[in-house]
Every structure is written in C-alpha cells, then in structure tokens.
Amino acid sequence: MKILIEYLIFPGFLFSAIVGLLSGWVDRKVTARLQWRKGPPWYQNFVDIMKLLGKETIVPAGSKFTFLLAPCFGILSVVLAATLLGTSVRLFTVSFRGDLIVVLYLLVIPAISLIIGASASANPLASVGASREMKMVLAYELPFILALVTVIIKNFGAIQLGQVIDFQLRFGSNLASWSGALAFIVAIFSMQAKLGLAPFDASEAEQEIMGGVLIEYSGLPLAIFKLTKALLLYTMPLFLIVLFWAGNMNILPLIGKYVAILVIIILIKNTNPRVRIDQALRFFWGPMTILALISIMLAVMGK
C-alpha cells in the first residue's frame, strides 16, 4: 500500500503532475511576456487537460490497440522515474543498486511511445513526425549517456542514485568540477531535446507538419501525452539535479536549483529558432559528443 501511495500521490503521479503543469505555466507566462503578451492564468494547463478529458477520442482504423496503448506506456514510465527520483531525494538510503540505469531507460520510453503511436495512426504527417522523433532520439541519447558516464566515473562507479547523492553531500557537487560542468552542459541540451522544446521540436512542428506525431490524437490519449510532457518537465530537471547538483538537498536549495534549470530551459527555448533534423544530428554527434568525451577524460584524470 505504501508503494502504491508513493507511486500515485507523492512523490509520484499527483505531485509530479502538479509541479510539471505549474512549471509549464511558468514557461508559457515567461514566453508570453517576452512576446509582449499577457499570458495564461496559473490554472490554464489544468483546465486544458480537463477539457481534453471531456472530448471525444477519435481512433484511426487499423491499429486501434497500439494507437491507444502507446500513450499509456509513456506516462507510466515517467511516473515510475519520478517516483524513484523523488524517493531517492527524500531518503537516499532506500535506493537500490542500478536504479540510475533504470531511470535512464524509463526516460527513453516516452519518446518511443510517441514514435509507436504516430506510426500506428497511418497518417503521412504523423509518419514524418515519427521519423523525425526517431532521428532525434538517436541524436541526443549518445551525448546524454556519455555525460552520465562522466558522473559514474566521478562517483567511483556508483550506479545507484542514493550513492550519487551521498557522494556529492560529502565531497561537493559534481557541477563544481571541470568534468562535471562540461557534462552538465551536454546534459542540459540533451534534456531540451528530450522535452521536445525549441530548438529541438521538429517532430511536432505545427507550422510544418501540424503537430506531427500528435496530429491524429484527441481526447483522453492526447491529454495523456500532454500530461506526460508536463511530468517530464518536472522529472528531467530533477534527474539533472541528482546527477550534477546534489550538494545541498534541503527543500529551499532544491527548489532554487529546479527553478534555475527551468529558467535555462525557457531561455534556450525562446532564444533559438527550430533546427532541422540534420542540424540536430550534427550538433549532438559533433560538438556535444566531443564535449562529453572531453568530460570523461577529465573525470578519469580526477578533474
């Protein structure tokens, strides 16, 4: 029962959804202000989700089961990742060996669920979006994993979230070293792509392919995908805090760190135009991968 409560309420689904939707509102509000608009009220994202829940779900003929199941896999994986991270932050002694790798895998599933769902819809524009999403995953996962390797090396091979947090509590944040700072930069850009935000939002480009991967979704399935994105907006920054910035995990410093990363996300989104898929591939497989490899070498040298 305790595990179920943690998964569904705190630090799992309910808590993560509230924080993620409020963070999404901050993003929309800041973006509106930068564009000299007023922006939505704080409850707008909650209203949007509730409105979608009341809409009709239109399912394309052909692959109904796959089409409807795909968003469920995405949201379940993110909620589990948020639960593992939240539990480790509260009580780092209760984490299990290898949970860091488990979270890494769980955070890949939402993108895969988007690809599967879009492909099942048999819509040409959705297929283009799925193709772009697949290439984007191949682009950003390599440098992100290399950045993760840097953290593992710096923490003497620790692949347990609790050990990573404990190491930084005793010896200082990984971000305070050269290797950690470089890996953090790589992880930030990879996170931006994982979140599907500009400049790496080609798979959903509304001006080009009218939503791409989400074009055929409506009602409850679309609400689930939107909620999954909100959950990721909470989970990904928290994951980066655990990996690189866990020197002080009290509530106020933790909130400050989360807000700082959220500000970085919003700044990147609002100051960069959308890049093409080939440009994204060159960016992640070029400068970001090289930077990640340099961070690994520095970590091996103890810097």
Image (cartoon, rainbow, N blue to C red):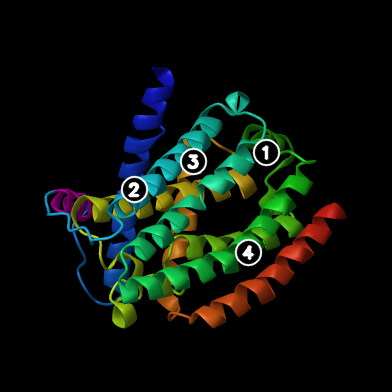
What is the C-alpha distance between the residues marked 3 and 1? 16 Å
Query: Which one is in front in this view, the residue at disc 3 or the one at disc 2?
Result: 2
Check whether the beta carbons of the residues at disc 2 and disc 1 lie within 8 A of each other.
Answer: no
Find disc 1 in the rendering and name its residue. 164
Query: Which class describes the residues within 10 Å of circle 3: few (<14), some (14-19), or many (20+)?
Result: many
Report the residue at 37% width, 24% height from top.
5
Query: Which one is in front in this view, the residue at disc 4 or the one at disc 2?
Result: 2
Check whether the beta carbons of the residues at disc 4 and disc 3 lie within 8 A of each other.
Answer: no
Image quadrant assignment for residue 159: top right
Q: Which numbered disc, 4 or 3, marks the residue that appears first in the sequence?
A: 3
45 lies left or right of 247? left
Using the image as rendered, state which of residue 211 and residue 5 is in the foreground: 211
Amino acid identity at mark 4: Val
Label 2: element kind: helix
**119 above or below 44?**
below
Amino acid identity at mark 1: Val
